[in-house]
């Protein structure tokens, strides 16, 4: 039976985290403006961007919706 990979701990590399951070950097609005427009707290976004903390699913969903991102299963395997 194939083992499931462990999810990355805070601070470890994850492709999803990298894509989300890049999208946030490239989106245009400042982080405080992004916070205002998405409802994700400014400190939460700053800590995520600095690698200090990860984001919970509700925050990721709000940011992904604003940034027009979606998760998709990799079917190339």
Image (cartoon, rainbow, N blue to C red):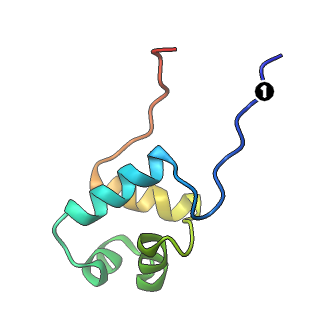
Along the viewing direction, whichever of 1 and 39 lies nearer the viewer: 1
Residue extending farthest right: 1
Which residue is located at x 25 percent, y 65 percent? 25
Residue 26 visible:
yes
Which residue is located at x 36 percent, y 60 percent? 21
Indicate the position of residue 56 as horizontal and vertical percent values: 59, 63
Along the viewing direction, whichever of 27 and 39 lies nearer the viewer: 27
Along the viewing direction, whichever of 59 and 48 lies nearer the viewer: 48
Q: Residue 32: name its quadrant.
A: bottom left
Residue extending farthest left: 28
Asked if residue 52 is positioned above or below residue 3 in the image, the reply reads: below
Numbered-mark total:
1
Q: Secondary structure at mark 1?
A: loop
Would you say 59 lies left or right of 31 here? right
Indicate the position of residue 75 as horizontal and vertical percent values: 47, 17
Which residue is located at x 28 percent, y 56 percent? 23
Asked if residue 72 is positioned above or below residue 61 in the image, the reply reads: above
Residue 66 visible:
no
Along the viewing direction, whichever of 3 and 64 lies nearer the viewer: 3
Which residue is located at x 52 percent, y 52 percent? 13
Would you say 27 lies left or right of 61 here? left
Q: Which residue is mark 1?
A: 3
Q: Residue 46: name its quadrant.
A: bottom left
Q: Residues within 10 Å of mark 1 (few under 14, many from 20)?
A: few
Would you say 24 lies left or right of 56 here? left
- Quarter of the picture holding the N terminus: top right
Asked if residue 28 is positioned above or below residue 2 in the image, the reply reads: below
């Amino acid at each position: 039976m194939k083992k499931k990979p462990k999810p990355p701990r805070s601070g470890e590399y994850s492709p999803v985290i990298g894509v989300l951070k890049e999208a946030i950097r490239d989106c245009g609005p400042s982080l405080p403006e992004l916070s205002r427009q998405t409802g994700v707290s400014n400190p939460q976004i700053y800590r995520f961007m600095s690698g200090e903390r990860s984001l919970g699913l509700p925050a990721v969903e709000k940011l992904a919706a604003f940034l027009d991102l979606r998760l998709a299963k990799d079917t190339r395997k």
